[in-house]
Amino acid sequence: MTRDEELAIVQEILDGNIQAFETLVLETQTKVYNLALRMVGNPDDAFDMSQESYIKAYNSIGSFRGDSRFSVWLYRLTTNVCLDFLRSQGRRAHNSLTYMSEGEDEKELEIPDERFSPELVAEKKELRETLHRGLQLLPAEYRAILLLREIDGLSYEEIANTLSLEEGTVKSRIFRARKKLCSILSNNGNFLQSPSSKKSKEV
Amino acid sequence: MACEKYINLISELVDNELSSQQECTLRAHIEQCSDCKRVYDAFMGISDALGQDLVEPPEMLAKGVMFKIKAHHKGGSRRHFAFGRFTALAACLTLMLFGASQFGLLDGLKSPSTNNDAVPQSNSYSVGAADQAPAYLDPSENDLPDTQAPPSKVIDGVLLPPPSVTPALVPPPEGSLFTSFGSTFQEIIENSVSNNQSPSQFIPLLLVDAKELEVYTGSYLYDFEKAELEKGRLEKASENSLIVKLTDSKDFLPLMDFIKSTRATKDIKQDAALPELKNEDALYSFIIPAQAEKPEEATSLRIIIYHKNEKLWCKTTEHLADGTVKGKPFVYEVAGPLNELEKFVAAITPVPTR
């Protein structure tokens, strides 16, 4: 759906055609749901977060100014709904943030072995499952940025605008998120058993 | 490490965020450097896996969103409202509580503790609660001129009701759970009557979210309770005997009738003492199963109707996947004649279990 098509539908909704909203829901629900699913980590909460996002979007559609695509605006809303939820749950976010900040940034990237070619990742279900579990170990804010890029296809600029960050911050967080996922994959799920990041590898 | 400046760019390469000149330089380097090639491959692999392993959203997502939006839109202009999978539980709970709320039980409700915290589901409703306005309790909001009543819709065999019938399925943030649920659900029934709608045009929200309701004779026993029973720690109780699964809106009609019948009775004593309810006193159990795709923390809701001291009593409990009780059970008296309950059961029994 093009930006103009989105805008036309938004206008219809503002004119009172509620049903038009369904078109937007159907168009965006896969990305919204998957974003929520990877953010909160389980289908049940993901369903709730997706619904909440859509209903918030509907309620505040009058404040959508059209300076970004509607879908981008919606993904931002979804991201914030998920982040609020995670904060309110106090889930993982705090712990993993602590973990990540303790020397993780300074740690050099371990060079992954050949196991992680795109072809192999595509073939190996367990690798992907490790990856999805690994996502939950990232700080929620990092996860959000990575998912906005990978699932929703937002550019760095769009992510930066969406989350009110500097583009450089987006860039470095995506890199660090990937670095972390690489390390999780390299440890093949054993990551949790060696949580002391202070003992970062001397290179 | 010599490659460090390149490695920092690999992520941007994966994201197509490099200028064409940067890209050329980096690609040339990656061709020659096995370390950077591996990093690039791994980043690409991660990217592919995240971007392509997309799960189909549940079918009910779009339907549920539209259902709720339409329902609430009918109450006036667009507004904030709450939602969530617990709406279904709320609706079902309301089914059972319906009579209680409007006809006196409300005031006479007794629970182990009289504050709202005693309500097992109260926490569940907190999602979005801040958005809720007490205005939902205003019956005038549900007024809907007949001429404007939109037609019902059938989607995938599920009969969606006109928007007018649901504004009330939202619990308010404060006050009595039963006031709001009961009266609001009653409004649904009232509206449907005033709009001359056939009861078959209702859709129980249960069908939207939880998808089914199981009715058992006697007390439904979870496995852990059976074990307790074997050890002699529980009173004798009937085995789990499933009468029927309600999965279709028409199946709910007898239940609706029963609930409506409870309106006839209102003599609930304010301070009626709660009797000790034993498993053997249980007449019927209603189970709203946790959704199949739910994780461990998913809860099912159990509603047991007891007959004790010539009265009907209802106990609701929320159960985790292993059957253990989450939160406190909630017990209250049901203002309904027993024969109406029997009629309800008689009406649903012939429906084969599916």
Image: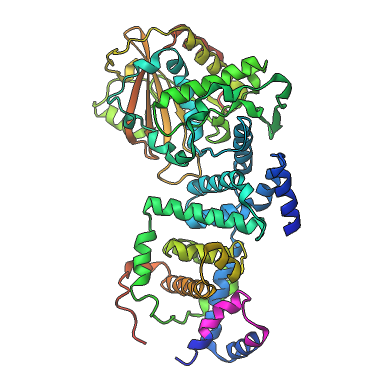
How many numbered marks have been drawn onto this rendered protein structure? 0
**Residue found 54% across the figure and 39% down from its top:** B80
Q: Quadrant of residue B9?
A: bottom right
Quick check: can you spot residue A123? Answer: no
**Residue found 36% across the figure and 16% down from its top:** B107
* Residue A190, horizontal then vertical, whole percent: 38, 68
Give the extent of the magenta segment: B7-22
Magenta run includes residue B21? yes
**Residue found 42% across the figure and 64% down from its top:** A139
Q: Quadrant of residue B47?
A: bottom right
Q: Is residue B270 above or below residue A158?
A: above
Quick check: can you spot residue B141? Answer: yes
Indicate left or right for B109 with B243 as reference: left
Q: Quadrant of the N terminus of chain B?
A: bottom left
Q: Quadrant of residue A97?
A: bottom left
Magenta run includes residue B38? no
Q: Quadrant of the C terminus of chain B?
A: top right
* Residue A58, horizontal then vertical, whole percent: 61, 44
Q: How is the image coloured?
A: rainbow
* Residue A40, horizontal then vertical, whole percent: 47, 54
In the image shown, does A35 or B145 lie closer to the viewer?
Answer: B145
* Residue B330, horizontal then vertical, whole percent: 34, 26
Q: Main secondary structure of the magenta part?
A: helix
